[in-house]
């Protein structure tokens, strides 16, 4: 019976072919039936594959991003300094406690030394707090540990989008951080500031700097969302590169078609 | 062409480079979707099942040894997920999905030949639905997914010649149901 499957597939060896013909002549195999079966197989083989909707891809990458952020990072602080650092900035409570500590010291100093009005001091302190957070964010972004840098990116999303220093730091991370996770986090944060033309321009320029297929695909999808026509040239250069995997090219081509 | 094999990519995913799963998704999402769609004829369910396959790949990445084919390992999960779904729903009824069937023919130029082709496909789909799951599955894997007999044998845990026999029986049944349906057009 497997012989009939091979006959329909056209993979019978010459010997088995002889045997097959013999069965046909002896009436064990009904050729009319075999032909009908071959015809049905032909219809099946020629049918086009059903295509999934765009939501499938979107949901998958969302799931992947969430999984990446949840992924525990191997961390093993060794030196005393690192341990102090980790306990102070390593978790949210540590950072919060540090911030509150600074605020209380500030308020205490302010109430003792201040001759200006209370409100002025608060505004001043507020400004200092923002500055301090910025500094902390920049310091975090330069750490060796991936999870620290991720936290740095997360901190930046709480800071004002109009702050050029923050945006510049995020772009530096987006274009040069060695970890894809951190670059994706930076991309997600920057994606929230796309009303700023400078941010859009920076994102377009970043396309050609990305070597990771995941980043290329993510950026291309963002460009589709933004309908950023300037991105087409950048995407084209990736498409023409020999180093780009074929799968990524297919996705990029689809994205380019969606940008009007 | 792609520089990394499925196997190498999956081993990197296992080591924690989750972003590499994106490349495997790009390679296989359409074929997995096709597999589920032919079985369920439900687009939404099929997309959910594809997503669940990749969730499972991620969850069980530590069990991947890299000694067999990644594709076979992945289809094992796909089959398990489908049997879970099937057990819960206990039905695989025929549900016409106009939008999808139309898509098959949108690019063809000849209207008459399209109509005939569509009728043939519809009839075939009806006939497929009347096969037992075992026969339907082996036809989907070999004729629609165009999987090699050797890989199907690995996946189903039977020999290659047993796969060929199963395909013969499935095609034979399919032919019988198809011809019955053809003779009674009202059954469509």
Image: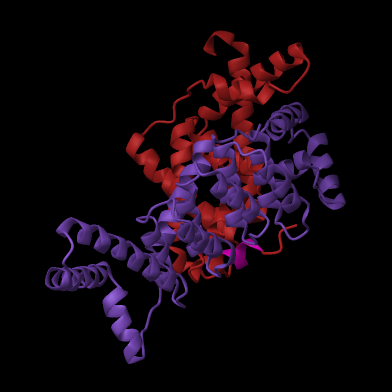
Vertically, is A5 above or below B10?
above
Instruction: Write down which chain is painted red.
Output: B
Residue at 63% over, 34% down: A258
Residue A217 in sight: no
Q: Left or right: where does residue B119 sit relative to residue A3?
A: left
Q: Position of residue A201 (x, y in %)?
A: 61, 48
Position of B20 with respect to B116 (left or right) is left
Which quadrant is the N terminus of chain A positioned in? top right
Q: Residue at x 83, y 35 (%)?
A: A25
From the viewer's side, name the closer residue of B31 and A87: A87
**Marker count (numbered):** 0
Q: Is residue A248 above or below residue A54?
A: below
Q: Can see residue A52?
A: yes
Colour assignment, chain A: purple
Q: Is residue A105 magenta?
A: no
Please provide percent x and percent y for residue A127: 31, 61
The span picked out in magenta is B5-9
For residue A191, side relative to residue A129 (left or right): right
């Amino acid at each position: 019976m497997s012989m009939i499957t091979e006959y329909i597939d056209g993979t019978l060896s010459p010997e088995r072919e002889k045997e097959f013909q013999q069965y046909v002549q002896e009436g064990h195999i009904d050729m009319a039936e075999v032909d009908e079966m071959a015809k049905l197989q032909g219809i099946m083989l020629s049918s086009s594959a059903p295509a999934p909707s765009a939501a499938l891809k979107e949901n998958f990458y969302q799931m992947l991003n969430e999984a990446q952020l949840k992924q525990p990072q191997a961390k093993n602080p060794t030196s005393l300094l690192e341990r102090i650092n980790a306990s102070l900035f390593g978790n949210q409570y540590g950072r919060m406690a540090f911030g509150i500590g600074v605020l209380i010291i500030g308020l205490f100093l302010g109430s003792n030394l201040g001759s200006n009005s209370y409100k002025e001091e608060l505004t001043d302190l507020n400004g200092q707090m923002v500055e301090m957070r910025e500094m902390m964010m920049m310091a975090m972004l330069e750490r060796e540990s991936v999870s620290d840098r991720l936290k740095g990116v997360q901190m930046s999303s709480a800071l004002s989008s109009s702050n050029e220093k923050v945006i510049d730091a995020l772009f530096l991370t987006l274009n040069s951080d060695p970890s894809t996770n951190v670059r994706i986090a930076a991309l997600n944060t920057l994606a929230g500031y796309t009303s700023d033309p400078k941010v859009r321009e920076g994102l377009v320029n970043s396309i050609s700097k990305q070597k990771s297929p995941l980043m290329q695909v993510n950026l291309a999808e963002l460009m589709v969302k933004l309908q950023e026509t300037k991105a087409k040239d950048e995407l084209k250069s990736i498409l023409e590169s020999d180093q780009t995997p074929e799968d990524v090219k297919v996705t990029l081509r689809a994205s380019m078609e969606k940008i009007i | 062409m792609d520089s990394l094999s499925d196997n190498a990519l999956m081993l990197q995913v296992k080591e924690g480079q989750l972003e590499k799963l994106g490349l495997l998704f790009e390679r296989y999402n359409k074929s997995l979707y096709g597999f589920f769609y032919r079985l369920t004829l439900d687009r939404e369910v099929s997309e959910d099942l594809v997503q669940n396959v990749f969730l499972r790949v991620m969850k069980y990445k530590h069990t991947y040894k890299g000694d067999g084919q990644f594709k076979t390992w992945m289809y094992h999960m796909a089959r398990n997920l489908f049997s879970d779904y099937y057990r819960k729903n206990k039905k695989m009824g025929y549900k016409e999905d106009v939008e999808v069937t139309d898509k098959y023919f949108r690019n063809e130029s000849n209207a008459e030949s399209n109509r005939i082709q569509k009728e043939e496909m519809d009839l075939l789909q009806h006939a497929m639905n009347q096969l037992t799951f075992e026969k339907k599955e082996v036809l989907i894997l070999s004729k629609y997914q165009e999987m090699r007999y050797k890989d199907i044998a690995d996946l189903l845990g039977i020999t290659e010649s047993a796969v060929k026999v199963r395909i013969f029986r499935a095609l034979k049944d399919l032919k019988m149901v198809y011809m019955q349906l053809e003779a009674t057009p009202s059954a469509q």
